[in-house]
Image (cartoon, coloured by chain):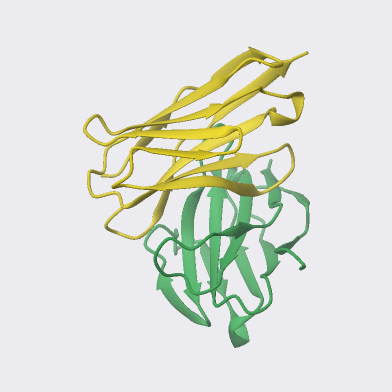
Chain colours: A yellow, B green
Amino acid sequence: GEDVEQSLFLSVREGDSSVINCTYTDSSSTYLYWYKQEPGAGLQLLTYIFSNMDMKQDQRLTVLLNKKDKHLSLRIADTQTGDSAIYFCAERGNTDKLIFGTGTRLQVFP
Amino acid sequence: EAGVAQSPRYKIIEKRQSVAFWCNPISGHATLYWYQQILGQGPKLLIQFQNNGVVDDSQLPKDRFSAERLKGVDSTLKIQPAKLEDSAVYLCASSLEGTGHEKLFFGSGTQLSVL
């Protein structure tokens, strides 16, 4: 079945880059997404990448996709304390359902 | 533009009791989703509506969970009777059409604690 995995925690210093990783199993994934969830709030779409791309840049965010290894990453440049949140990777496969990963809690220290 | 509204924000009940959650999607959004997010896990789709019809309820525990979307706008999700393992955040989301890779807009969720 479809499965999306992420590491649970990441801690970085303010101003450094953060890299959040995700692996998925569904080779028929069409779109892959990164969502951000702040405490007590719903999920907010940050960015997405189509499966025929290998990179997408959007201001401080860079998404890298290695389709052969089924590996997705999100790089946040110049990480700020306001970036502290849980980041979810999600994929949309042939069932057209959005399958979320377990989430990575990013903590940014001043 | 108003976002997805959910209520109540928190709910504490004892096992075997009933509970209902309410969601008002963004105006004009045809598709409405209910997700269950257990602590430490990603959201899991429970049910998807397109207007007032059910598109996918394959992961809804139908022996105790029910949902409806009368008139294709607001929706309610009910649990009867609740079990301890139902403790979770219940997220409602909506999208314009529910096709392709449309953006989903999420509400803040209802946090349910079953004691």
> In terms of image quadrants, where is residue A108?
top right
Q: Residue at x 46, y 70 (%)?
A: B98
Q: Where the N terminus of chain A falls, by quadrant?
A: top left
Q: Nearer the viewer, residue A91 or B18?
A: A91
Q: In this rendering, is residue B66 above or below A94? A: below
Q: In this rendering, is residue A12 above or below B40? A: above
B16 on left or right of B53:
right
Q: Is residue B113 in sight in this rendering? A: yes
- Relative image position of residue A7 (x, y in whole percent): 47, 22
Q: Residue at x 27, y 38 (%)?
A: A25
- Relative image position of residue B114 (x, y in whole percent): 66, 44
Q: Nearer the viewer, residue A75 or B17?
A: A75
> In terms of image quadrants, where is residue B84?
top right
Q: Residue at x 59, y 83 (%)?
A: B72
Figure label count: 0
A54 on left or right of B84:
left
Q: Residue at x 37, y 62 (%)?
A: B58
- Relative image position of residue A13 (x, y in whole percent): 68, 12
Q: Is residue A92 in sight in this rendering? A: no
Q: Where the C terminus of chain A falls, by quadrant?
A: top right
Q: In this rendering, is residue B30 above or below B57? A: below
- Relative image position of residue A16 (x, y in whole percent): 63, 15
